[in-house]
Image (tube, rainbow, N blue to C red):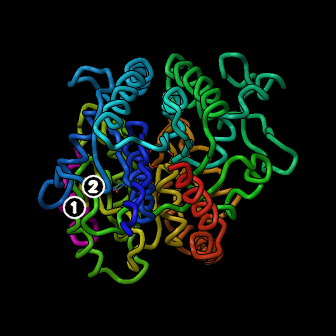
Amino acid sequence: MESSPPPPPPHALVIPYPAQGHVISLMELSHRLVDRGFVVTFVNTDFDHARVVASLPGPRPRTGPTPLRLVSIPDGLEPCADRNDIKRLTLAVQEYMPECLEELLMRAASEGSPVTCVIADHCMAWALDVAKKMGLRAAAFSTASASMLVMALSIPKMIDDGTIGDDGVPTEPNRMIRLSPEMPPMNTTHVWWNRFGDPSTNRVLFDYITRGNKSIDTAAEWVLCNSFSHVESSIFKYASIVRPIGPLLPGVRPGRPVGRYWPEDSSCEEWLDKQPPKSVVYVAFGSFTVFDPRQFQELALGLELMGQRFLWVVRPDVTEKMNRAFPRGFEERVAGRGRMVGWSPQQRVLAHPSVACFMSHCGWNSTMEGVTNGVPFLCWPYFADQFLNESYICDSWKIGLRLCKDVEGIVTKEEIEAKVEALLSDGEVVGRALELKEMAAMSISEGGSSYDNFNEFVDSMKTFV
Ligand code: UDX
């Protein structure tokens, strides 16, 4: 008797918001799905796709059938447009990409490789509507904290109780609020959609998120996030629809794409190998943070003044107008104890025994990566959810210290020196960071809550195939 052919594997389409922290996190989720037997079509914008492919080590990926297919669609902006202009990017994305995604899904079906489920970044929630329209199963994934997501989902409640106006602006800045009685208090200045710089950008983001909430509400069967229950337990009690599956650790799969935009300078690992244990301050501000030249120089002087060894990620575009001028003679004076790179293999750097602490902008991926490696933080948030994350690190988990600005809005070299010294001599903060590391490891190990949630999600998405 002839046996029937095996059923085709489940096919997930994964779509991140076009920003580095989002792409890396969803790429890691895609690898996990591939490990569990899925075929994944990973949809970047054309602009990001070119960067991701150019940054892949070794030969270009095969073009034939592979379980992880990197594809792209246009973001609606002209090729030379500034993609760090979040307002323009977001307006273009929501207007232009839904139709392109629909076409892509139809093409996949007509080519005999139909998509069975769509996993959309919660900042691309319109993709859930496209999935619903085409009769596909859909899940939302937040690359940021559960708190950030739940705060967004609570917008109607916050308008009703007068915390924010119809425009998303807090009615009373600097007021402590609680989304539910069990949850830790939050400062209204941390309302993250109001932290994108200028009011018109804030408004565009607020409207975009509000629309996204409706899509999540009507189309998402699952709402996942890159967090774990121990760090935000009250949020998961309050909003049980949100399920943590993290921390997702990027970059620990040799030979597979991580989704980075810039090539890694892994020579810093050899340099780290030569440094004493717990001696290096790792300084990195993610993919978006832009320093004005004065603050950039002051940071360099602070690293010089503190006298510790340091590894500093200086992205090509880390300063306004790409003006990465170090103070005169700086590089010679710190030679030997200071190392600058354009982009580091951050996950491996944070796991290195020579790293003592992490001076960070508190992007959520960086936060989870520091937590997973038991590294204490010096917090220097820049925008959006990073202030909320700083508050978790310093006030709730107590595994870091804030770098404070002076009256002119500058983090001075003296502040940097003082806080580095305070952090490295505080055994309790370091001890709590190591405890949290254990909790993170437990959550993704067999029997841990993130492990169980991911299994449940995968099993559910494999049905109906
Ligand atoms: C953005 C927002 O800034 C952040 O607040 C939000 O939570 C996610 O989206 P980004 O600024 O890039 O992200 O910061 P982050 O979330 O920390 O992500 C940066 C990623 O780049 C991390 O995975 C980190 O490991 C990686 N990275 C950073 C490197 O691999 N090398 C580097 O040198 C610096």
Residue visible at 16% across and 54% down in the picture: 62
The question of residue 329 being in magenta is answered with: yes
Mark 2 is surrounded, within 10 Å at the Cα level, by few (under 14), some (14 to 19) or many (20 or more) other residues, namely many
Residue visible at 34% across and 26% down in the picture: 103
> Quadrant of the rendered structure where residue 339 is?
bottom left
Image spot of residue 115 (x, y percent): 41, 42
Nearest the viewer among 190 and 244 is 244
Name the residue at the right extreme: 181
Nearest the viewer among 441 and 96 is 96
* Residue 418 visible (yes or no): no
**437 lies above or below 261:** below
Q: Which residues are magenta?
A: 325-339
Distance (Cα) linking label 1 and label 2: 6 Å
Image spot of residue 371 (x, y percent): 55, 66
In the image, is the residue at mark 2 within 8 Å of ligand 1 by its beta carbon? yes
The question of residue 393 being in magenta is answered with: no
> Quadrant of the rendered structure where residue 28 is?
bottom left
Image spot of residue 420 (x, y percent): 49, 64
Nearest the viewer among 10 and 316 is 10
Check contact, mark 1 vs mark 2: CB within 8 A.
Answer: yes
Which residue type does callout 1 highlight?
A: Asp
Locate the N terminus by quadrant. Answer: bottom left
> Quadrant of the rendered structure where residue 163 is?
top right
Judging by the rendered image, the residue that carries numbered circle 1 is 265
Mark 1 is surrounded, within 10 Å at the Cα level, by few (under 14), some (14 to 19) or many (20 or more) other residues, namely some
Judging by the rendered image, the residue that carries numbered circle 2 is 343
* Residue 32 visible (yes or no): yes
Q: Earlier in the sequence, mark 1 or mark 2?
A: 1
